[in-house]
Structures are given as C-alpha cells and as structure tokens.
Image (cartoon, coloured by chain):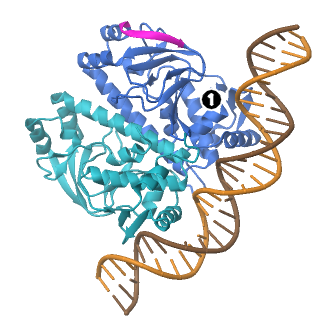
Chain colours: A cyan, B blue, C brown, D orange
Amino acid sequence: MNPLDATRALMDGLGSEANVCMKCGSRSIGLCAPLDVAALDDMSGESERHALEPRDAIFHQGDPARHIYTLTEGTARLTRVLPDGRQAVIGFRFAGDILGFTPDKEHAVGAEMLTKGTVCRLDRRRLEHLFRRYPVLERRFLDLCVKELAASQDHILALGRFSAEERVAGFIISLVEAQERRGRVGPVFDLPATRADIGEFLGLTLETVSRAISAFRKRGWIRLHGHSGIEITDRPALMGLGSGEGVHAA
Amino acid sequence: MNPLDATRALMDGLGSEANVCMKCGSRSIGLCAPLDVAALDDMSGESERHALEPRDAIFHQGDPARHIYTLTEGTARLTRVLPDGRQAVIGFRFAGDILGFTPDKEHAVGAEMLTKGTVCRLDRRRLEHLFRRYPVLERRFLDLCVKELAASQDHILALGRFSAEERVAGFIISLVEAQERRGRVGPVFDLPATRADIGEFLGLTLETVSRAISAFRKRGWIRLHGHSGIEITDRPALMGLGSGEGVHAA
DNA sequence: CGCAGCGTTGAGAGCGGTCAAGTACGGTGG
DNA sequence: CCACCGTACTTGACCGCTCTCAACGCTGCG
C-alpha cells in the first residue's frame, strides 16, 4: 500500500464499496456488499435512521458502545481527547462508512458531524445476532478492520516523518480521491473540514495548514473557490509532495 | 482506554493472554486462548519453527503475505519505509504476539528481530482452513484487530500532540507495563530497542530521545544500568508526563 | 448593512533537528 | 585479566520549521 493510501483509507473508514441499504435508502455500506437480499432485509429492518445537524455528536468518547452506525449522508470526524483537553482528529468519515464498531464496552473515540447528514443506527446485540446468522459478515468486518489498521499505520508514518506541507498535500490528494471513489467528478472538490479540523488531523496548527494551502495556491497547484471548494490544477506536484518522494528520492 | 494504553497495546500487538502452543513450546499466543486441545493440535501440527538472530528479517515490506507468524521468543520491530528511504517503526512485538496477519496479498510492513528469538510460521491457507473449522478463531482475530486499531489511534494522538519528553515518558511506561504483563518483576527492566529505534517509533531523532532520557535521569526519575537496563525510580512522575496530563490539566 | 466565524498573514520565540565531537559500554583476542 | 575496537550513547552549538500571539480580511447569513 502506498503511503498516500494512508489518509486515503483512513478517510474511507470501514466500508467503501457502493450498495443500497433498504431502509436508509441512500447509497450505502460496503458492509452489506456480500449479503443477499434476505440478510439486507434483516439488517435494515432492525436499524433506525437519525437526521443530524453540523456539530451534532453521533456518540461521545466514553459512551457505552451499545450501537454501531452507518453514515448514510454527510461527513463526520472521529476525535480522541486527552485528560488535559488536548484533542486530535483521528479520521474523517463519509457517506457509506461505518462508525462506532468496537468489541469494547465503551467508545474509545467520539464522532461528530461536520455537515448535515443522517446515520443508520443498529443495536450491537442485533449485530452479534447477524454475525451468527451470516458468518460472512463477520469476515467482512475483519477485512475492513485490517484495512483500516494499515491506513492508521500509514498515518502514523506521515505524522512521524512528514513535514507540514507534505502532510497537507497528502491530505488534499486523499480527500480528492475519496470523493472520486464516491462518484464525484468535476474539477472542484469539497473541503468539508475547517483548517482547525485539518490541523488536528495532521498534528499541525490551523495557521500552519493555512500557510501550506496558501503556498500551494501561490505555486499554481490549486485554486480555491470560497471556503469549501478546492480545485486541483497540478495534481502530479501535489502527489509528489504528499506521497513521500522527498528530496532524497531513491 | 487511557492514552497510555496507546503504546501499551501497540506493544502487545495481537495477542496478550498467556497460553502454551504445543509445538512452539514456549509461553504463547493469545490467539489460541479460546481453542480447545484438538484445535491447538491442528494449529501447532501445521506450523514450522524458525530461530532468528538480531537484525534478521522475519518478512519484508512488499513480500507476498503467504504466512502468519507467532513470535515465541525475543523482540521484533515492525517498520514501514517510504519511497525516498525515510523509515518509521510502526510498533514493537514481544514473545506471544502475532506478526504478519493481513487479508492483502502483500505485507504492508516489514518485521525484523531486535534480539535473538524464534518464530512459529503458519501457512495462510491453513489459517483460512482453521477459520472455517473453528469460527471462534476468526472472532478472536477480529477482537484483537480492533484492539490494535485503538492502540494505533492512541499512537496517532501521541505523535500529533505530545512533546518529545511526553512521548519518551509514555514509551518507557508502556515498555515497563508490557514486561510486567509478561511476568517480569524486579526493579530493572529491559530496553530492547536502541535510541534510534525508539526515535523512529516516536517520530523523533535518536539525539532527542537520548536528551529526554538524560533529563529523566537528572531529575531522578530513572536510573540506567548499562545500555539496555532501565530502573524506574519515580513512576508517578513518568506516568504523569507520559499520559497526557499536560500543564493545562483539567 | 453588520455581525460572527473562518481564513490569511506577519513577527518573534522555542522545540526539536542537524552536524560534530567526545564518551561509555560490551564483546573479542591476547 | 587487560587492551583493543566497534557500536551505541551523550553532549554541545547552531539552525530552521512550526507554534504562538496578534491583527486584519473575507464570506455568508440574518
């Protein structure tokens, strides 16, 4: 896996293939992909849909982990806080991703919406039930989990070894690729996170993120459209910087 | 999960409960814990044992992922390299941990021994076979994988938000706790990694790691015994620094 | 039009990186 | 047991990247 897949898969989270969840309606979870219609019925028949506003919490760090969620519309962030209040964004999640899956009693991370959106909530005991009925589902969770683990490791590599500009470049590329994989085309992409969110994800301050983005703009690599639109004008340059082909290139 | 569990679980890797693998002999893999004797026989009957020297590679990044390994003696590190040669240590693994489990075709990380030791090698197709015969085994992999994912997220938090001294303090505490959980008692613990390895794990240079350790020594928090022995003389101080109870403590 | 939130830009400081000696450990051979 | 040597570790001086603090600008909304 390329280091760029780093953030890439962290963003895709659990679940990436398109499918349609019966009750949720919208394009949905890779989780369901290997299931037949009966299983999908089972699953959607037992889930509840919730509409959420920006900044709404889906669940908090430390909450009892009684449900798992599918994000059916919108964008969310996963956060982890320290005793002294310092905080990091662990990852972003988009439509189709799964949130809050853990074998522990409590959620180790919190999840908040960045945009309006909807989630599909499934009771954890029912999930265990589904695991027993459709063993392939459990295997699917395992695969996705290992994939996410690999992505986390790439993120660790980026945080430990990348300069500020390299991290921001990698982040932009991953964001664009995540949107492309979800069917977005046009030259202008969505930048759903604030500079502060990006900074907390990349281990940087919001000023440093802003300076990196300004630098890319001045070099003609990107163009900004309002606060949340970004157009890539020199993709190879961004990719070169963001994928660890540093100065000592082999 | 406490942020200190961060490195803690990264160090424990997959598998932490004690058990005895028939063929490997030594105290072994959490993986086997839920299996009955017949299953253990199956598993160990199909594995091969290998002795390794310090710096030997168990597998390389990019190798076809044909086997999974149990580290039965010694300490290993997991590494990930970038195209330009920059490298990060993703984690450390000790006796009883599992190495190289992935659903991908290739190993995304490399694994090398830090000390002398032995590994138990199991063909991946045989593992799939065992999954079908003992479904509980697959569930166990899933649990361990989620646990390791949580640990990776804590490490991300540490890399993104901790100062150099906080990271080194957290690392030492995790190392000590990992050894205690493996039955080590006395006041002097093993420091199996070089300053360079620790630095690559924590996103620091070896000089910075050395300075942090010297600072702890001068404050009377630790005492060094040769190059690889470390004695904790003020554990609360180290833990306070290493677990994110920074200055703005809540 | 005015406000609030987000983003940009600048100046200065500090943490950690880099480069360069110098030192201690631990294994090997006499 | 000691001398030797290679490796790892320590320490210092200096530099640069990123953080911090602060002011200003933009954008979208009421």
Answer above or below: position of B242 versus A168. Answer: above
Three-letter residue code for mark 1: Ala
Horizontal side of residue A131 vs D8, given as left or right:
left
The stretch in magenta equals B45-51
Viewer-proximal residue among B156 and A52:
B156
Q: Quadrant of residue B192?
A: top right
Q: Determine the residue positioned at 57% across, 25% down.
A: B179
Q: Secondary structure at mark 1?
A: loop
Q: Chain of mark 1?
A: B
**Residue B247 picture location, percent across and down:** 60, 55
Q: Quadrant of residue A198?
A: bottom left
Q: Determine the residue positioned at 64% across, 45% down.
A: B165
Magenta highlight on residue B47: yes
**Residue A145 picture location, percent across and down:** 33, 36
Answer above or below: position of B129 versus B82. Answer: above
**Residue A177 picture location, percent across and down:** 33, 51
Residue B239 appears in the picture as rendered = no
Horizontal side of residue A192 vs A210, given as left or right:
left
Horizontal side of residue B39 vs A234, given as left or right:
left
The residue at which mark 1 appears reads as: B193
Viewer-proximal residue among B113 and D1:
B113
Magenta highlight on residue A247: no
Quadrant of the snapshot with the N terminus of chain A: top left
Which class describes the residues within 10 Å of circle 1: few (<14), some (14-19), or many (20+)?
some
Horizontal side of residue B201 vs B120, given as left or right:
right
**Residue B135 picture location, percent across and down:** 25, 21
Residue B168 appears in the picture as rendered = yes
Q: Determine the residue positioned at 32% across, 62% down.
A: A190
Quadrant of the snapshot with the C terminus of chain A: top right
- Magenta region, main secondary structure: strand
